Image (tube, helix red, strand yellow):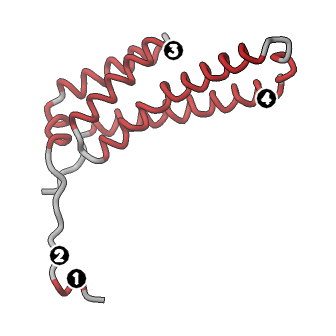
Amino acid sequence: MNTKMPTLLNVIRALLGVQTIYIGISMGFLIYDILLHSADYAAFPLSDQVAYFTNAGIRILLILGPPILTMIFIAKRRYKWTMTFMILTFLFTAGLLQNFLVVLHLFMLLVLLLHKPSKMYLKQEAPVRQYSKRDLQV
């Protein structure tokens, strides 16, 4: 029983991918800018610098981690894990970014909750391949 991925679910996966690429490139420019102007941070005590950069690193992980895991679990057809990481993506986006992505993530979450074909696709089991002795011989 090999069914096609519903169009809306494919759109969600594509939007999460574009968002991850966009945020990854933005974070790359941020890190480059920080390294380029590292002398500007030398005036602050070392403990403040460590706290600032640790905070920035944790924010990067919280913003990039859940969308990537959501895309992985959509591909693996795991409904509960997909919903868990989609909710985390929405919460972290609402808490850390506060821009148009919050509305976009709310739309994606509602589609995953209410769109019946997407829900059924994620809940179905992946087919298990049966091997015979002939397949296993080299």
CA distance separating discs 2 and 1: 6 Å
Give, as a three-letter code, the residue at label 4: Leu
Q: Is residue 127 above or below residue 27?
A: below
**Given contact means CB atoms under 8 Å apart, are the residues at marks 2 and 1 in contact?**
yes
Sequence order check: which comes first, mark 3 or mark 4? Answer: 4
Residue to which mark 2 is pinned:
131
CA distance separating discs 3 and 4: 23 Å
CA distance separating discs 2 and 3: 49 Å
Q: Is residue 1 above or below residue 5?
A: below
Residue to which mark 4 is pinned:
35
Tell me what residue is drawn at x 29 percent, y 23 percent. Answer: 109
CA distance separating discs 4 and 1: 54 Å
Sequence order check: which comes first, mark 2 or mark 3? Answer: 3
Q: Is residue 34 left or right of residue 66?
A: right
In percent of width and height, residue 128 lies at 16, 62
Q: Residues within 10 Å of mark 2 (few under 14, many from 20)?
A: few
Q: Secondary structure at mark 3?
A: loop
Residue 28 position by quadrant: top right
Give, as a three-letter code, the residue at label 3: Leu
Residue to which mark 1 is pinned:
135
**Given contact means CB atoms under 8 Å apart, are the residues at marks 2 and 3 in contact?**
no
Residue to which mark 3 is pinned:
97
In percent of width and height, residue 27 lies at 63, 28
Sequence order check: which comes first, mark 4 or mark 1? Answer: 4
In percent of width and height, residue 1 lies at 12, 57
- Foreground: 129 or 21? 129
Give, as a three-letter code, the residue at label 1: Asp
